[in-house]
Amino acid sequence: MKKMLTAVLITGILALTTAWSSELMSSSNSGGVSSLRGNVAISAINQSESLKKNKKDSGLIDLGYITQPPLIPHKIRGYRIDVLSNKCLSCHSWKNANENNATKISVTHFRTRDGAVLSDVSPRRYFCLQCHVPQTDAKLIVGNSFKPVKALQ
Ligand code: HEC
Ligand code: HEC
């Protein structure tokens, strides 16, 4: 009898929580307070942009100007850069570049800001994505008529 009661109780609680959470998910239960946007869920009027697709890996991307950090011509999803490891360097370091057919990081990446040349990548060049970015198929938000200098055309 006791077991039966417990089972009934648990089922009841489960049903209640499911109903309550689906209520939370499906409608904007504002508790009687109406917001400026009206009584609608944000997701109903403000859909988030879908994720943009990475451009297909297709060889190096031309530079726009001389000292530009080259754009990343490949996917980087899941490439970790933290204090213990740097996925980018597992292909782009001078040691690993040849074997991976990747471009070596530039000599400038070994220099400190005072011009001293270190034996490994300089801390100010460690977080690659500060300067190098991949490209997606996103539409331009504003037009751009920038043309590279003649030497790069
Ligand atoms: C699995 C190996 C691998 C990893 C990891 C990797 N890359 Fe690359 N990367 C390559 C290869 C190979 C190329 C050359 C592509 C080609 O020639 O088509 C390249 C090209 C590049 C270029 C263009 C170089 C140029 O001269 O135009 C940049 C910039 C770059 N990668 C940055 C990065 C960054 C930043 C990361 C980490 C977020 C990273 N890569 C991780 C293999 C890798
Ligand atoms: C502070 C900005 C900055 C950071 C951080 C940075 N780079 Fe660069 N990178 C540049 C610039 C600018 C160039 C082009 C001019 C030069 O060679 O210094 C470049 C050039 C390169 C090149 C092309 C070299 C060549 O010979 O054509 C590769 C590959 C590269 N970076 C990879 C990386 C990787 C991998 C990291 C992270 C470990 C990294 N960079 C961090 C700015 C940066």
Image: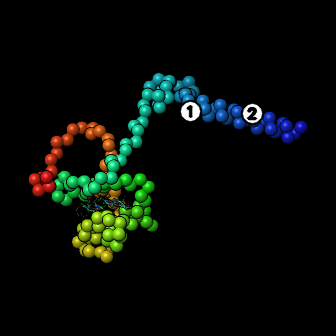
Q: Nearer the viewer, residue 148 or 24?
A: 148
Q: Earlier in the sequence, mark 2 or mark 1?
A: 2
In-image side of 48 versus 39 (left or right): left
Q: Nearer the viewer, residue 7 or 31?
A: 7
**Which residue is disc 2 drawn over?**
12
Tag 2, which secondary structure?
helix
Q: Residue at x 50, y 24 (%)?
A: 39
Residue 3's quadrant in the figure?
top right
Tag 1, which secondary structure?
helix
In-image side of 89 versus 27 (left or right): left
**Callout 1: 10 Å neighbours few (<14), some, many (20+)?**
few
- The mark tally for this picture is 2
- Residue 26 locus on image (x, y percent): 56, 29
Q: Residue at x 24, y 38 (%)?
A: 142
**Which residue is disc 1 drawn over?**
25
In-image side of 7 versus 42 (left or right): right
Q: Residue at x 84, y 36 (%)?
A: 5
